[in-house]
Image (cartoon, rainbow, N blue to C red):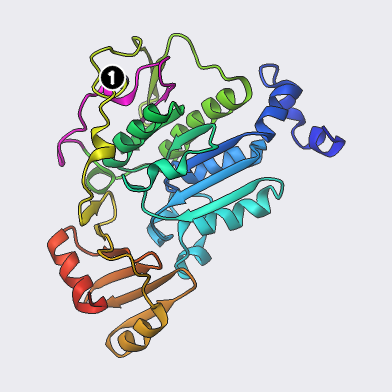
Amino acid sequence: MTHATQDRYSRQILFAPIGADGQARLRGSHALVVGCGGLGAEVANLLARAGVGRLRIVDRDVVDVTNLQRQALFDEADARDCLPKAVAAARHLARINADVAVEPLVADVNATNVLELLPGVDLVIDGFDNFEGRYLLNDACVRTGTPWIHGACVSGEGLTTTVVPGRTPCLRCLNPEPPPTGAVPTCDTVGILGPVAHLVASLEAAQALRWLATRTVPEPAVLVTVDAWDLRLHRVTLPGPQPACPCCGERRFEFLDAALAPAIELCGRDAVLVRAHSGGRPDLDALAARLRPHGELLVNEFVLRFRAEGRELVLFRDGRTIVKGTTDSALARSLVARWFGA
Ligand SMILES: [Zn+2]
């Protein structure tokens, strides 16, 4: 280890469970952050500062001004320029720690691509804002034996637990099925406190550093819940993996095997993601020329953003569109067809 490295991470090396050996292991580690919003952006920030050698960051959305209340990695220029979160995160992280190799991926993580994200990765950190993504990630991580850290927050509360397949219970051991749509509060119904997202992200990052530096988790496995408003923390001791669990017990990967919905509602954004129905990549410049007379337009190297009639459509280079200003999937698909064509 060079003097500069020793100096930079000296306070963390002084922390005995990490030490110089743990710091070297962090440097040789590769972490995947899926979802770069309230949780993922802060996890990525903390892991980059801690000197985790490689970070792959995947997110499907662009920075929006409503993100800035809690997502401290981003700023007003990112929102104004309509930058994808993964790209904006990579640019900020390069200025925070130039020694970390950051790989930004602007993509919707789904059953068709999640397994491609995992090879070479030591640990996955959940920055999702939806159950669909987490159950899919649980399937992918259990199937490949990849540890992952689950985190979630809404309103003034949050929770986190670490899943090490075969050693600790997986998400489906704890909750065999995701809650039905509308059954639990979400960020769009009850909001989210910025500090809660940072609290849960910090706990996720601490457990990520522990795993990457030492390959250990608290034993027995625990789930921690926090209420930042009323200052309550609960540590729940978990049982071992459940033999009857459909995922890690019976090894049925129902979320990996599920068909892709053509459109899904996005948590907290009054928005719908419309998936591309053909493999072709859209010609954003040609489309921009056609749309310019009809509304407000922004094109950059990553997206085309079109605003008209009180709605906003963001078309990504991979052919997906996020339609903001509605939660009606059918309406969103018809808007995409109307403005962007088939
Ligand atoms: Zn399980």
Ligand 1 position by quadrant: top left
Vertical relation: 286 (above or below) 333? below
Dot 1 lies on which element? helix
Quarter holding the C terminus?
A: bottom left
* Residue 158 is one of the magenta-drawn residues: yes
Taking the image as shown, residue 28 lies to the left or right of residue 250, namely right
Viewer-side residue, 56 vs 260: 260
- Residue 250: give x, y in percent of width and height: 26, 19
Residue 163: which quarter of the image? top left
* Residue plotted at (51% across, 49% down): 72
Residue type beneath disc 1:
Cys
Residue tagged by mark 1?
173
Identify the main secondary structure in magenta: loop
Is ligand 1 less than 8 Å from the beta carbon at label 1?
A: yes
- Please provide the residue range marked out in magenta: 156-184
Residue 14 shows in this picture: no
* Residue 12 is one of the magenta-drawn residues: no
- Residue 201: give x, y in percent of width and height: 47, 35
